[in-house]
Structures are given as C-alpha cells and as structure tokens.
Image (cartoon, rainbow, N blue to C red):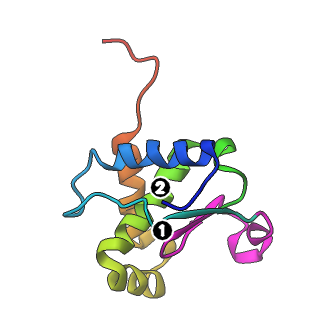
C-alpha cells in the first residue's frame, strides 16, 4: 500500500471495512494501489467547486486532509476506486455519457455509503 500518514491510512481502512460488508463486486476493494492526495487548488476550479473529493483510477483527491473529512466521503470515493477495479470501461463510459445525478456509478456509491453508515444514538 502506498505510504500515507496514520490518519489517512486509518480513514482508508475504515472505508474498506465498510465496503467489505457489501457484495457489489466479486472481490473486495484493494487498497494496495490507492493513493490519497490533498489538492485544495483543484477544488477551486469551476467544475470541481461543489466537490470535496474526487476519484481517479487509483487516486483519491481531497480538498482537505482525510482526518478533516467525513468517513462517508472517503467511503464514497473509495467505492469509485472499487468500481474502476472491476468495471473501468463501463465507469468511464458512464461518466462521459450520463449526467452526474443520473450516473449509475455515482448512485451506487451513494447507496454504498448509506447502506454502511452506522446510526449513532439509536437504541434497541
């Protein structure tokens, strides 16, 4: 696994543990190739201003360090990495041809986060 600071490594491990509870793809998400980069300048670009994170093939770009970002965001972006590990061509095609809110891979990542979110404060 690429070297990350302890907080980033822990955030990735928590996100992986969440995604490992799902059976969206035949194999669990692999963290070995995943890099996390903090690139606040990127999120000042007009098309990216509304985002706090963005996933590339093996890289998660974050507006701020992982320790400052919600686990849901890291899980969401790691889900996009997982999608690309199994369905790269389909994911790229969907990003090129579908609107953001209608992209099946975006919707799947949102559902993955919701399905693995722990509800705190809820009694039995």
| Residue 67 appears in the figure | yes
Instruction: Name the residue located 30 percent from the left edge and 77 percent from the top edge.
Output: 87
Residue 119 part of the magenta segment: no
| Residue 104 appears in the figure | no
* Residue 111 percent location from the top left of the image: 36, 53
* Residue 38 percent location from the top left of the image: 71, 61
Q: To which quarter of the image does residue 59 belong?
A: bottom right
The image's mark for residue 23 is none
Residue underneath mark 2: 76
Q: Distance between the residues labelled 2 and 1?
A: 14 Å
Instruction: Name the residue located 39 percent from the left edge and 87 percent from the top edge.
Output: 93
Residue 48 part of the magenta segment: yes
In the depicted structure, whether residue 23 falls above or below residue 82: above
24 sits to left or right of 48: left
In terms of secondary structure, where does tag 1 sit?
Answer: helix
Q: What stretch is highlighted in magenta?
A: 40-61
* Front-lying residue, 20 or 4: 4
In the depicted structure, whether residue 92 falls above or below residue 81: below
Instruction: Name the residue located 49 percent from the left edge and 71 percent from the top edge.
Output: 58
Mark 2 or mark 1, whichever is nearer to me:
2
Q: Earlier in the sequence, mark 2 or mark 1?
A: 2
Residue underneath mark 1: 101
Q: To which quarter of the image does residue 117 belong?
A: top left
Label 2 Cα crowd, 10 Å radius (few <14 / some 14-19 / many 20+): many
Q: Image quadrant for the C terminus? A: top left
Instruction: Name the residue located 36 percent from the left edge and 61 percent from the top edge.
Output: 30
């Amino acid at each position: 696994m690429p070297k990350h600071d302890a907080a980033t490594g822990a955030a990735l491990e928590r996100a992986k543990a969440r995604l490992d509870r799902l059976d969206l793809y035949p194999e669990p998400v692999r963290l070995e190739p995943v890099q996390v980069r903090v690139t606040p300048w990127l999120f000042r670009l007009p098309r990216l201003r509304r985002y706090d994170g963005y996933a590339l093939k093996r890289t998660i770009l974050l507006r701020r360090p992982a320790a400052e970002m919600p686990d849901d965001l890291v899980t969401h972006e790691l889900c996009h990495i997982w999608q690309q590990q199994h369905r790269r061509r389909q994911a790229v095609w969907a990003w090129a041809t579908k609107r953001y809110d209608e992209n099946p891979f975006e919707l799947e990542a949102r559902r993955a986060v919701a399905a693995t979110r722990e509800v705190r404060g809820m009694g039995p």
